[in-house]
Image (cartoon, helix red, strand yellow):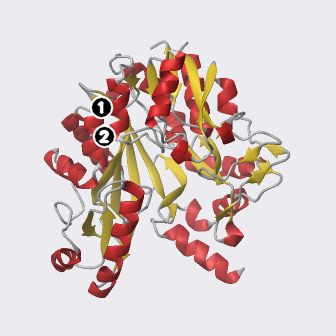
Amino acid sequence: MKKLLVANRGEIAVRIIRAARDLGIRTVAVASKADADALHTRLADSCVEIGPSPASKSYLVTEAILAAAKETGADAVHPGYGFLSERAAFATAVADAGLTFVGPAGSVIEKMGDKVAAREVARAAGVPTVPGTPGGVDGVDAAVEAARHTGYPVMLKAAAGGGGRGIRVVHDEDGLRTAFGQASTEAQKAFGDGTMYLERFVERARHVEVQVLGDGSDAVHLFERECSLQRRRQKVVEEAVSPGISEATRDAMTSAAVNLCREVGYTSAGTVEFLVDDAGGDFFFIEMNTRIQVEHPTTELVTGIDLVAEQLRIAAGEPLRHSQEQIERRGHAIEYRVNAEDPTKDFMPQPGSVGRITLPSGPWVRCDTWLEPDGTVPPYYDSLLAKVVVWGADREEALARSRRALDEFTVAGIPTTVGLLRELVDEPWVGSADFHTGTLEQWLAERKETS
């Protein structure tokens, strides 16, 4: 691997370019018109403008990205996260063009990206799955019949895609009949596939994910992350490792994730996601993300392993460099996603011009961002501005460092979520880790009522 094209933007493009530079790999950035002078375009060795500002006309156009690779002589493509990162057709097109795709093969992405097919793979690997339909359901009447066997409440989920789209929780038959068409239509628009399946809804569940690396022959885990603090099924705060599971559950869950990777001959970094029943500690496979995750820095801070660099090494044909016994965890890390959103206006995105900014730094604080003073937040993309990541010798120290880091973060010109995150850190239930996937939304609703 001599020259890497980074098929993404924002903080993840910056992150990948830096990892490639550390390894002596030259980089090519791509940019829409809106990103013509963005930080990632200036950090890379060269840049190609690939289209107008909307992602549908630039970052989501496979032909434009492949043309940029050909023009610049790139021999590899890293998709980052989002955009084309989990589209099997893109991975296949990159390989067919004679380039190295930094990620699993298109066939693996296709298999694990379809939640129904992924559940079947998980069962074959002996990994527990949430009780529900074995595959997609053929219409609302079939869904109603399945729910009678599973029992309410149930969760309707899109077989393709993710990011919280095409998901509905229903508590009775009337609710199911109403929600089915809505969820299917949403999934069809988002993913081009309206197929739905159904599973039991675990009401007090933690969302815990296991970070894995595979080289096609073997796989290892790098422990787990707690991702239960969510709003509208979007993660807000993540921790490594989970403060809410036992060592026995941790051992069983991480072993299950590795078995799943071995079952499919997984290559690259990936994340195996589970629901953990807060009542009994049982865990269930829900999906696999076949890419680098937004929250990967927390794992890097507790293991000392650069996940993006490992992706690049594996893609270049190197075997795994670490045995399971060599991977150790130390301390605790927490990541806070800072978005250009206004919490007082139902988290409406707030694009616009920014003035002076102050980014947190100092001992054991990492800030991954694309944001620069006097820059502009475009309206076309995700509202993520930065990820503030802190490490502590234990969780208590990490929370204390979080207060200092979030207090330092300032952006002039537009509203952000940093104040809300700072307020969140002081909540007693955060300090005691007494939460589940619905806790943050309950807190937000109560906070709104009293404001």
* Quadrant assignment for the C terminus: bottom right
Q: Is residue 433 above or below residue 93?
A: below
Identify the residue shown where x is 66% and y is 53%: 379
Amino acid beneath label 2? Ile
Q: Quadrant of residue 103?
A: top left
Q: Residues within 10 Å of mark 2 (few under 14, many from 20)?
A: many
Which of these two is toward me, 426 or 389? Answer: 389
Identify the residue shown where x is 37% and y is 38%: 270
* Residue 418 disc label: none
Find residue 19 and report its horizontal and vertical position in percent.
Answer: 55, 24
Instruction: Describe residue 311's horizontal placement relative to residue 350 as left or right.
Output: left
Find residue 206 and report its horizontal and vertical position in percent.
Answer: 40, 61
Instruction: Describe residue 355's horizontal placement relative to residue 184 as left or right.
Output: right
Q: Residues within 10 Å of mark 1 (few under 14, many from 20)?
A: many
Q: Secondary structure at mark 1?
A: loop
Question: Is the residue under label 1 in contact with that under label 2 (CB below 8 Å)?
Answer: yes
Find residue 44 and report its horizontal and vertical position in percent.
Answer: 63, 23
Instruction: Describe residue 186's horizontal placement relative to residue 352 as left or right.
Output: left
Q: Quadrant of residue 138?
A: bottom left
* Quadrant assignment for the N terminus: top left
Identify the residue shown where x is 78% and y is 42%: 375
Find residue 367 and report its horizontal and vertical position in percent.
Answer: 67, 39
Query: Can residue 127 be seen at all in this image of the molecule?
Result: no
Task: Measure the alpha-carbon separation of dots 2 and 1.
Answer: 6 Å
* Residue 109 disc label: 2
* Residue 105 disc label: 1
